[in-house]
Amino acid sequence: MTRRKYWLAAAAVAAFGLTVRSDVAGKAFAQVLDELQQTLMVDVDLVVVNATVTDPLNRYVTSLQREHFRLYEDRVEQDIQYFSAEDVALSLGIIFDISGSMKDKASVARDAAATFLRTGSPDDEYFLVAFNSSAEVLQEFTTDISRLQNHLIFARTSGMTALYDAVYLGLETLGQGINTKKALLMITDGEDNHSRYTFSNVREYVKESDVQIYAIGIVDAYGSQLGLGRAGRSNINELAETTGGRAFFPNSVYELEDITTKIAVELKNQYVLGYTSSNENADGEWRDVQVRIERVPGLPRLTVRARQGYYGPIQ
C-alpha cells in the first residue's frame, strides 16, 4: 500500500463504473484490466489497501460493496476510486526457518508449507528463502510449486537464526514479482540471534513496502524461544499487524497445516481499495490509514483488518 505507480487502467475501470466481478462482457475482471493496461500508457499514483473483513465468528465476509467501506488518511476521508473483491493473482515468498532448533519440527512445517502451496491459483507465483545463520534464496519466483517442495524436502536444519536478514531478503525479492498483490509467509520457532539487519531496519523496510506479512511463530513444548514471551514474539506480531497481515503462535506443530490453510483462504478473500491521496504534500512523512465498515443491514458488527499506513511521496 505504499505510493506506487499504477496504470491508468485501474482508475479507468473505477471511473467507468465497471463491476469487478466476472460479468464484464463475459470476461474476468483481471482480463479486462490486463487489456486496458496494454492500451493506456499513462500512469497515476494510487494508494492501494488490501482489507480483510470478518464477522464475530471470525468468518470471512465477501459480499460487501464499495459503499460499505469508508477509508481515511490521517483522519481525512478519501474517495475510494478503485474497488475489487475478486481473487487476484499473488506473488508470495515463503520465509522458512531451517535453524538447529527446528530439527524436531521441520518435517511438519514442510508439510504445512506444501499444503499452503497447493491452495494457490495457476497465476500465483512463489519463491523460497531458507535461513539459519544466514539467509538464502533457494528458489527464485516460479509458478511450479514442485520446485519449492523439492527444496523444502532436502533442506537440512542447523545453525542459528538470522530471521531479520531473511525477512529483508524476502522483501527485496518480492520487488521482482510480476503480480500487484504481494505477501510473505514466515515460518519460524525462534527469535533472531544472528542477523546483520536489526528489527528497526526491517520494520522501516516493511513500512516502505507494499506487502502483507503472515507469520507462524511456533511456541510448542520443544523449547521454542518464542514460547518464553521474549521480544521476538512481539516483533513478529508487529511486522504482521503493520502490513495488515496476521501472526499465529500455535502451541503444537500439528496446528501448522490448519493455520497455513487459513492464511491461504484469507489471501483469496480480501477486498482491494484504491485512492489518490488528498494530501498533495511531497514531504515523505508517514500517513496513517484507517478502513472502516458501515453497518450493513442484516449483518452483525464486522471487523476489518488492513495496513496501518504508508510513507508519502518525496519531491
Image (cartoon, grey):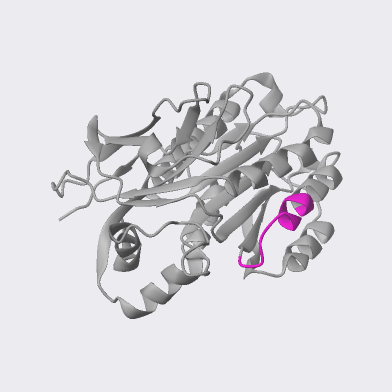
The correct choice, above or below, for 11 with respect to 48 in the image is below
Residue 182 location, x and y as percent? 51, 55
Can the viewer see residue 144? yes
Q: Is residue 307 left or right of residue 97?
A: left
Image height of 305 relative to 109, above or below = above
Residue 308 visible here: no
Residue 271 lies, in percent from the top left, at: 48, 45
Is 117 in the magenta? Answer: yes
Please give the name of the residue rendered at 60% of the width and 37% of the height, measured from the top-left corner. Answer: 192
Residue 308 sits in quarter:
top left
Quadrant location of the C terminus?
Answer: bottom left
First to last magenta residue range: 114-123
Image check: 274 left or right of 238? left
| Up/down of 247 relative to 35, above or below | above
Position of residue 75 measured from the top left corner of the image (x, y, whole percent) = 24, 29
Q: How many marks?
A: 0
Q: Residue at x 50, y 57 (%)?
A: 21
Give whichever of 18, 140 is nearer the camera: 18
